[in-house]
Image: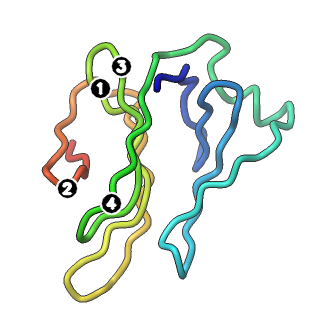
Amino acid sequence: MEFDFYGTYKDMFKMGTVIALVTPDEHLGFRTEFISAAIEIANKFSEEPLARVTYKSILSEGWKGFTLTDAEDGHIWLTAGTKEDHYGNKEFVFLSNMEQKQSKVDSEGFVWM
């Protein structure tokens, strides 16, 4: 399924008509909350869609999260979730790739720039 993508602001992104806040969660690793768009927040995003994106959930050993990938050229606009090392240490990840149109995704879905 494809959605219009309007960009990121701090730890939020706008996809379609929804603004989502991605935050760390001590039990789940990360949490995505859909928030009502106050005018001052809504104005932080592009008025026109930047791209059509696909949402891909990633659940693998060491990584739980999602990516928003450009449906036309494969550019990864956003990677968010939790990365866990082999010691069990968790790291919250919110990588907005607004400036750069080239990135590589490894086999676990993590974006390396």
Instruction: Name the residue tied to disc 2.
Output: 108
* Quadrant housing residue 65: bottom left
Total count of labels: 4
Image point 86% across, 37% down: which residue?
A: 38
Q: Is residue 17 above or below residue 106?
A: above
The residue most toward the right is 39
Q: Secondary structure at mark 2?
A: loop
Which circle's residue, 4 or 1, is located before the other in the chain? 4
Q: Is residue 61 above or below residue 46?
A: below
Whole-Å distance between the Cαs marked 2 and 3? 20 Å
Mark closer to the observer (3, 1)? 3
Q: Are marks 2 and 3 in contact (CB under 8 Å)?
A: no
Viewer-closest of 101 and 59: 59
Whole-Å distance between the Cαs marked 4 and 2? 8 Å
- Which numbered circle lies on residue 59? 4
Which circle's residue, 2 or 3, is located before the other in the chain? 3
**Residue 75: image x %, image y %?**
29, 26
Whole-Å distance between the Cαs marked 3 and 1? 8 Å
Which circle's residue, 4 or 3, is located before the other in the chain? 4
Image point 50% across, 16% down: which residue?
A: 50
**Residue 111: image x %, image y %?**
25, 46
Q: Are marks 4 and 1 in contact (CB under 8 Å)?
A: no
Which circle's residue, 4 or 2, is located before the other in the chain? 4
Q: Secondary structure at mark 4?
A: strand
Q: Secondary structure at mark 1?
A: loop
Report crowding for label 3: few under 14, some 14 to 19, many 20 or more residues within 10 A (C-alpha). Answer: some
Q: Could you tell me the amino acid type at mark 2? A: Glu
Instruction: Name the residue tied to disc 1.
Output: 75
